[in-house]
Image (tube, rainbow, N blue to C red):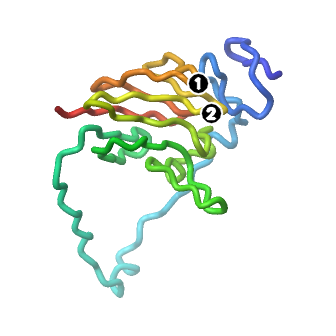
Amino acid sequence: MINCPSCHSPNLPGTFFCIECGASFLPSRIRETTTSLGVPSSSDEQGAATLPPPAAPPELTPPILRVVILNSGRKLGFNTDQPIMIGRQDSARSFYPDIDLSTDGGLDAGVSRRHATITIRSETCFIEDLGSSNGTFLNKDRVVQGTTRPLHHGDEIRLGNILLRVELTS
C-alpha cells in the first residue's frame, strides 16, 4: 500500500491520485511538463493558405446534457438513452469512449480507459463509477463503484485530475 503524503490514507500501488483527498502521487516534474506550441511568425504565414473554419453540423434537437471539460473548455452535448462512456481511447482494443479525455491529458491526469458512465433516464442524468483506479467524485464526494448518483445542473465531476461541469437543459 502507498500512504498519501497529504492525508495519510492507504492507496493501492500504481495509483496516481489519493482515493480520499485527490492528492497527486506523480513526481512534480511530470505534473509541471508543458508543451509550447509556438506562434507562427508573420514570415511563416506569408506562404500559408488560410482555410475557413469547418462549419458545425446543425443540432436537430437541443441536448438534454452538456458536459464541459473545464481543463480544455471543450463542450459536448448528448440526447440519448444509451449510456455515455467516459474514459480514454484504446486504439489497440478498438475502444473509443463517448467522452474521450485522452486529448485533455487523461493518461497523466489518472483517467481510466473505462472510468465512468452517465445515463439519461426520463430526462434525469446519473453517473456511475466503473471501478476506475483513481475514483470518480461528484461535487467532491466519491461515487462508490456500482452505485448511481443523480446529476444536477452545475454539478462538478472529477475523474482523476480532470474536472467536468454538468449543464442540463429542460
- Say above or below: 39 vs 81: below
**Three-letter code for the amino acid on which mark 1 is drawn:** Gln
Closer to the camera in the image, 51 or 110:
110
- Picture quarter with the C terminus: top left
Q: Position of residue 145 (x, y in %)?
A: 58, 24
Q: Position of residue 143 (x, y in %)?
A: 52, 21
Residue found farthest to the right: 1
- Say above or below: 57 vs 133: below
Which is closer to the viewer, label 1 or label 2? 1
Residue ID for mark 1: 145
Q: Position of residue 66 (x, y in %)?
A: 29, 40
**Three-letter code for the amino acid on which mark 2 is drawn:** Ser
Closer to the camera in the image, 21 or 146:
146
Separation of disc 1 and disc 2 at Cα? 8 Å
Q: Position of residue 99 (x, y in %)?
A: 44, 47
Quadrant in the picture for residue 27: top right
Which mark, by number, is residue 26?
none
Residue at the spot 70% in from the left edge and 35% down from the top edge: 26
Residue ID for mark 2: 132
Closer to the camera in the image, 17 or 167:
167
**Who comes first in sequence, dot 1 or dot 2?**
2
- Picture quarter with the N terminus: top right
- Say above or below: 11 vs 118: above
